Image (tube, rainbow, N blue to C red):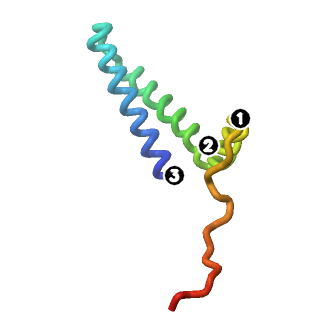
Amino acid sequence: MEKVILLSTVITILFVVFKYAEAKYLENLTLSLKLTIRNMVMIFSSSFIVLFCYYTNERLFIDFLHALTGTSSSITTRPPVFTGDPDF
């Protein structure tokens, strides 16, 4: 969950920086605070929902992409378990 919040925050900050640079240097406009806050909330919530869905269903997405490309999965489904005799 922390990874999702961190990535969503980074995406939102990058969007605001690029939007500010575009408005100031390319279009010579001033941004209203209301529209900026609205855009930030929309970007954060959109990226949060997408990233949350991806990380909770990551195995499903990986299997789907492997089925589309025809490659085999590199992630093992069995957990690594020691089954030999101990060395001590």
Q: Secondary structure at mark 3?
A: loop
- How far separated are the C-alphas under marks 3 and 1? 28 Å
What residue did someone put label 2 on? 53
Q: Residues within 10 Å of mark 3 (few under 14, many from 20)?
A: few
2 or 1: mark nearer the eye: 1
Residue at the image position 57 percent from the left and 38 percent from the top: 49
| Depth order, front residue of 38/1 | 1
Residue at the image position 67 percent from the left and 38 percent from the top: 65
- The amino acid at mark 2 is Cys
Q: Residue furthest top?
A: 27
Q: Which mark is residue 1?
A: 3
What residue did someone put label 1 on? 68
Quarter of the image where one finds residue 37: top left
Up the image or down, 57 lies above or below 78; here it is above
| Depth order, front residue of 33/51 | 51
Q: Earlier in the sequence, mark 3 or mark 1?
A: 3
Quarter of the image where one finds residue 66: top right
- How far separated are the C-alphas under marks 3 and 2? 11 Å
Residue 81 position in % (x across, y down): 62, 74
- How far separated are the C-alphas under marks 2 and 1? 20 Å
- The amino acid at mark 3 is Met
- The amino acid at mark 1 is Leu
Q: Secondary structure at mark 2?
A: helix
Q: Earlier in the sequence, mark 2 or mark 1?
A: 2
Total tally of numbered discs in the picture:
3
Q: Residues within 10 Å of mark 2 (few under 14, many from 20)?
A: few
| Depth order, front residue of 86/42 | 86
